Amino acid sequence: MIVIESIQCGRVVTEGDPLTEDPTRREWTTAFYKNPINGPVEMAPMGLVGDSVANTKNHGGRDKAVLCYAASHYEKWAAEFPELGMSAGGMAENLTIAGIDETTVCIGDRYTIGNCVIEVSQPRQPCWKINRRWGNNTVLKRVTQTGRTGWYVRVIQGGTISAGDEVSLTAQPHPNWTVARAGEIMVDKTPGTDSIEALKNLPELSPEWKKDLP
């Protein structure tokens, strides 16, 4: 069974030291910090109502309305970085989901959650903010190495969701194109391969991801 383990939203904050040369302590403005939501949450075409985006150029929008993350990854993070105390929402995800991960979720997958319908649009492309959030220079590297990135979805039909809701796969048009495989191609960026062209031709893949491919 696939279930929403928890739901998180965040507000934009500015913190850090504007004078430091330490990249894990420098000043930044972010909505990375996500707090658990108890009770129903409205999911709209632009994301969860009550959630904020600091960098609207690179985050948010219809193709990256909601960030999802596999609940099972947090056991691995706890084993590798026990001092950080990572838990649900630690990767800035809106939905922490049990029962699926990047190796089983595919580009174009459609899921229903109650009266909502979501569609997988692209892998999450991790950036420096992960290290900044955790004050650690190696977490980002591990995210990339392990493929524990998370994935974005667009909202096809909005509605109300709650932690504990069951998530049902209703369509999987590209079963060979897992989020993990698409993410590996972006990292490797091997030009001229048939796989890159095939990935670009997936109609459900976000235009931004296609643009960044070689």
Image: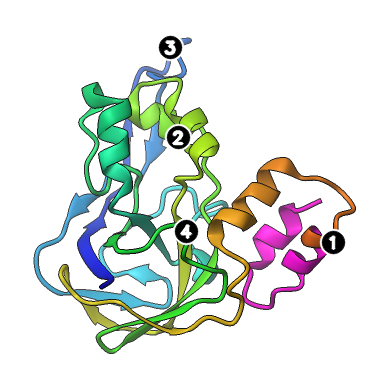
Amino acid type of the residue tagged 1 in the rendering: Asp
Residue 8: % across, % down? 24, 57
Label 3 crowd bin: few (<14), some (14–19), many (20+), radius 10 Å: few
* Of labels 2 and 4, the one closer to you: 4
* Of labels 1 and 2, the one closer to you: 1
Res. 19 mark: 3
* Residue beneath the point at 28% across and 50% down: 11
* Residue beneath the point at 23% across and 25% down: 82
Q: CA distance from mark 1 to mark 4?
A: 23 Å
* Residue beneath the point at 55% across and 59% down: 179
Furthest residue toward left = 38
Res. 194 mark: 1
Label 4 crowd bin: few (<14), some (14–19), many (20+), radius 10 Å: many
Name which of mark 1 and mark 2 comes first in the sequence: 2
Q: Which residues are magenta?
A: 196-214
Residue 17: % across, % down? 36, 17
Q: Is residue 127 visible?
A: no
Instruction: Tell which of 17 and 7 is nearer to you.
Output: 7
Which residue is identified by label 4? 151
* Of labels 3 and 2, the one closer to you: 2
Amino acid type of the residue tagged 4 in the rendering: Trp
Which residue is identified by label 2? 129
Q: CA distance from mark 1 to mark 2?
A: 32 Å
Image-quadrant location for residue 175: bottom right
Image-quadrant location for residue 15: top left
Q: CA distance from mark 2 to mark 4?
A: 16 Å
Q: CA distance from mark 3 to mark 4?
A: 34 Å
